[in-house]
Image (tube, grey):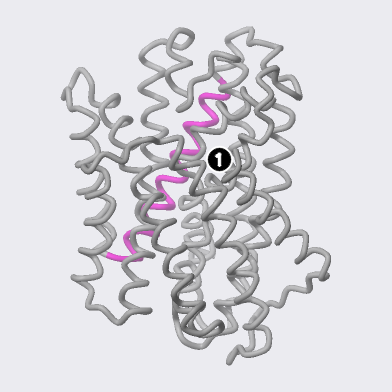
Amino acid sequence: MKNFILATSTLIGTIIGVGMFGLPYAASQAGWGLTLVYLLVLGAVVMLMHLIYGEIVLRTQAKHRLVGYAEVYLGRSGKFIGSIIFFVTLYLALLAYLIIGGEFLSVILSGVWNITPTGGALLVAVLGFTVVFLGLKLTGALEFLMSAALTVLILGLAAQTFKFSGRAESLSFFSPAGNFFLPYGVILFSLAGGSAIPEIRNFFIAGRSRFLKMAIIAGTLVPVLVYIVFTTSVLRLSGSATSPEALAGLAPILGSTWIKYGALMGFLAVITSFFTIGLNIQNSFRLDFGLPKLLSWLLTAVVPVGLFFYGYKNFISILSFTGAVLGGFEGILLLLIWRKARKKGNRVPEYKLKLHPVVVYALLLIFLVGVVYQFIY
């Protein structure tokens, strides 16, 4: 039970990250009801993709990450494509966490230590990459504690909304703004947690990996429920004045104390995801490319920090591109790997998915349409 809880918490902590803070703004632009439909549908899609990734892991004797599985089942071309998708996606995620994490830390420490967002980002990098270097056991324990704290904070925000009358028009199905596709990329980014699947497999000894399926289902569904509560709470309070990062739009309503509260909530969401994603990049360099631990750690840390100081700091653009485009390509790649793994896998998995071909083609279509639409518009 302990390992099941740690595995589930690790996945939850990986999923609940900075993407959550873009959801209320997306809902204000597309419509609250439509955004909930997106969350439910894409939540089911992402859960299936996580289960597919889990089956790939269980069908393979050797331990890899996405890049390694792409090479095993799709050859060198698969490894090349997988490497681009994997590293660009996770590096951009870490970059987004540095940007918004620095902002949150600056707000939290204001009045005590007036640190700039850039200084805050440096502190996030130091803390995050130190934990990554120390490894999985420390990460798993921190994921559990921080995920629990984050859930309590979000419920507290939801309870706070009952003290205000709210804005009924903000909970309409469609928004007059008419940006109906906007939630797609943000939601895919906010629900992505595949990077944690190989990590949480390590919590289960041989013969007990059947619990991995349960951990994946629970670890994916809980963030969907948390996002619904968070999005509804913020949108009910700030309505059309909802800001891109959710918090600034709440300032006139809740005051500075609650903004710090929200910043703390955001920082917990950022740092828990930062740990697992950073560890996944480091382990990919070690397991898939055979690099030593110190070099793998340096490569993990230098790229996002370098991009940050080079000037790549457009938070919303990073979320949209990573979620819709790179998330779409990763989904397609996983489906191709899964198809090969079912035939060439060298291990009997503890669970096997039985998906009708129509479901598989529907998943491919969803990802392709998202990629094309993002590039066109």
**Residue 24: image location, x then y, percent:** 57, 27
Q: Is residue 202 magenta?
A: no
- When the figure is inspected, residue 284 is found, relative to residue 307, above or below; the finding is below
Which residue is found at the position 62% from the left and 83% from the top?
A: 341
* Residue occupied by mark 1: 186
Q: Position of residue 273 (x, y in %)?
A: 41, 50
Residues shaded magenta? 135-159
Q: Is residue 156 magenta?
A: yes
Residue at 57% in and 48% down: 324
**Which residue: 60% across, 62% down?**
331
Front one among 281 and 372: 372
Task: Tell me: residue 187, above or below residue 77.
Answer: above
Residue 344 pos. (x, y %) = 62, 90
Residue 296 higher or lower than 141, as above or below:
below
Asked which quadrant contains residue 47, the reply is bottom right
- Kind of element beneath mark 1: helix
Image location (x, y in percent) of residue 348: 64, 88
Q: Is residue 228 left or right of residue 13?
A: right
